[in-house]
Image (cartoon, rainbow, N blue to C red):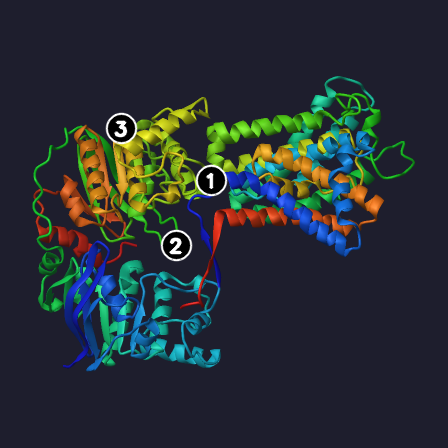
Amino acid sequence: MIALEKRPEPSRWLGFATPLFAVLATMIAGGLLFAALGKDPVAAIATIFWEPLFGEFAFYYRPQLLVKGAPLVLIAIGLALGFRAGIWNIGAEGQYIIGAICGAGVALAFYPFESALIFPAMVIAGAVGGWAWAMIPALLKVRFGTNEILVSLMLVYVAEQLLASMALGLLKNPEGFGFPGSRNLQQYPSAFNADLIANTGFHWGVAAALVAVIFAYVLLSRHMLGFHIRLTGAAPRAARFAGVEPSRIIILCLGLSGALAGLAGMFEVAGPSGQITIDFNVGYGFTAIIVAFLGRLNPIGILFAGLLMALTYIGGDIAQSQLGLPAAAIQVFQGMLLFFLLAFDLLINFRLRWQKGATA
Amino acid sequence: MTALLNLHGLTKAYPGVIANDDVSFDIDKAEIHALLGENGAGKSTLVKMIYGLVKPDAGTMTLNGKPFAPHEPRAARAAGIAMVFQHFSLFDALTVAENVALGMEDAGPLRDLSNRIEEVSNRYGLPLSPASRVGDLSAGERQRVEIIRCLLQDPQLLIMDEPTSVLTPQEVEILFETLRALKEDGRSILYISHKLEEIRALCDAATILRHGQVVGSCIPRDTTARAMAEMMVGAAFETPETRPQGSGEVLLDIQSLSLPATSQFGTPLRDVSLTLHAGEIIGIGGVAGNGQDELLAALSGETRSDAAAITLDGQPIGRLGPTGRRALGLSAAPEERLGHAAAPDMSLTENAALTGHVREKLARRGFIDWRRARDFAERVITAFDVRTPGASSAARSLSGGNLQKFVIGREVLQRPRVLVVNQPTWGVDAAAAAAIRQALIDLAADGAGVIVISQDLDELMEISHRFGALNGGRLSPLRPAAGLTLEEVGLMLGGAHDMEVAHV
């Protein structure tokens, strides 16, 4: 029998090093996987990690890194605050969709009127939309003790149906020749979330993600509220003893993560995506869960994890098109990353003990 | 009558303490034998030896005239000894019959087992349906499941560890009927309890343990509760020397505080009243699970009550949370160190800020000054001689005694007006315990009020000015500890009012 025994004082240094080990182990195991598929493992790994950054078409891929990384980081920061407190918002994808619908809805309501106030109004609408969607599991949990994991997850599917209905009905482009989807906000200057510096991919969402990283870092490390969030996750009874109201933390964490996910959705619909369509959401809300853990629920870590995840997405796409790797293999590769991270994490916090046969 | 089980010279030592010292007595056939003693008197160790959980260092046992040395519970069960533990090991999601089957070596088909369960439950007056789910049962019914599980093994000796601690008075009556029926059947029962009136009502013989030694035996029916209490408590505590009394100024006033039980096994607080003066230490004794945790939570602010039920310096604080109460000077230190008083995985600095941020002003406009928090943690570590590599060590890495010193020190150094502590020296070595007690005495000497909730009578008699006992969530009237005789302490604890009709 193998038993796990908690280490009294886990090494801090190793705590910081695990993500690197996890990436290395993923490269090795992924290389074996690609080799088993009959591809050159070195070339495949290089394509995924090197090509987007320094390859021939890096000028195209580098901005993509920010475009894909920003929503991941923005959502993951919010999720990490909740995860730190032991509050599991799995429905960021739904909050992302609702944020996008609300943001786009505000813009389309004013179309074609031009004003500098429209974009700020969209930002607020996006955040409020995501917040409100997250308040459903929050209030149900506080009031009736429901499980926020299930409620928030199921609300993703509700949000997807709402998105389809919006794309086909209320927000459908009246000049779209009957095709589903809203007007393209990229062609509506007041609402367009354009690159702040041309052709860098650095749009308002990237700026918001960076602000969120700094905000969350200060909150968690310096502020009493962040301390109480960590305390609630680490020792709920001690948190109550310290004077923390559990329901307040639930509402706060779910609300914050919902608002950030809503913002991410809003920046996406106003910028890179441009319109509300049936298949607007591409899974950022779920991938952000991986990003949050890959970043060890630490805001700075999440920043790097988000970029790394974006890199494997872009690199994975390149590997699919250039090397003919199946999409499933890329997904396995990304899954490995989380698996190895969690495995190494376990070994840092626990030691393995071999026990002689089970005793009664 | 002949002896069923004979214990001769049983001795068991643990590092630093002799749990059982040359314990000898007999349990007769068809006898309900009480084993009486305070917490820590060695009752649990003794029954663990009989049940094969612990191996004695010296001494012998004979069962039915044959040498008996069980090396594991299975051997003890095979020899006809069964035990009902204080804490039940039942699965909520399974039915009664399934739970019983899990605890048996050869359960057989479930249908036969259900029939046998019904048979036994009818025979001994233990109303219970084999098909009901354990999760839906009351504490008393759960205990019946455990008893039936034991009875199906046809034991000669049934050991019951504090069986009534979780029962309502009505359930106690049913249990007693069952135990008497078992005795009629020729079975013996070893009944462990502190509750004197119960023992007088039920038991045929009693052996009294104190500090691991047999200090007496008696026929409970013919002995007064007073006399038993005297034997149980012994001359262990002298009349305490007079300490400087309170100045008379009222700090904390609790008036008719009643709170419903917060959890299934919780105890409701019933009409608790006390007045704490400046400079005074009030000791509150009682058997575990009689409302100690609930009283601490009601005072710390984790449980709210009517505003006027608790007043501090004349100000109603019943509705305030822990932070508000700390700001006014009411601090608390709960019994459970890891996970309640301190967060195990957080550093001592963070744990210092856990309660210290209010009074030590460790936060400014919501931002924590970690350097001040660290200074505060280091002050606690120095002042209370906490053995640790430093303030950045995780609370989990400290030994129980050191963490307890840290927890108490953290509260004492905040100079509270009133400090409430639960089991301040539980599991702490003698030197650390003395240091903690001294700190509490010093705090009171400086004009604060202290409430010490403890199960250690010696400790309470040593440091408290007035003494009261919690019993079923009810607090006895407080008596000056200095004038208190041994009998009175025993009666308050053993609770002559313990057997009164339930106030439901």
Q: Which mark's residue is nearer the viewer, 1 or 2?
A: 1
Q: Would you identify the image quadrant in which residue A176 lies?
A: top right
- Farthest right residue in view: A177
Q: Are the residues at dot 1 and dot 2 in contact (C-beta closer than 8 Å)?
A: no
From the image, tell me which residue sits under label 1.
A232
Q: Under tag 3, what secondary structure?
A: loop
Q: Under tag 2, what secondary structure?
A: loop
Give the mark count.
Answer: 3
Q: Are the residues at dot 2 and dot 3 in contact (C-beta closer than 8 Å)?
A: no
Q: Is residue B164 visible?
A: yes
Q: Position of residue B9 (x, y in %)?
A: 15, 69
Toward the viewer: B321 or A354?
Answer: A354
Give the chain of mark 1.
Answer: A
Give amino acid for label 2.
Gln
Give amino acid for label 1.
Thr
Q: Under tag 1, what secondary structure?
A: helix
As measured in the structure, the alpha-carbon distance from the residue carrying label 3 to the one carrying label 1 is 26 Å
Give the chain of mark 3.
Answer: B
From the image, tell me which residue sits under label 2.
B264
From the image, tell me which residue sits under label 3.
B415
Give amino acid for label 3.
Arg
Toward the viewer: B313 or A57?
Answer: A57
Q: Earlier in the sequence, mark 2 or mark 3?
A: 2
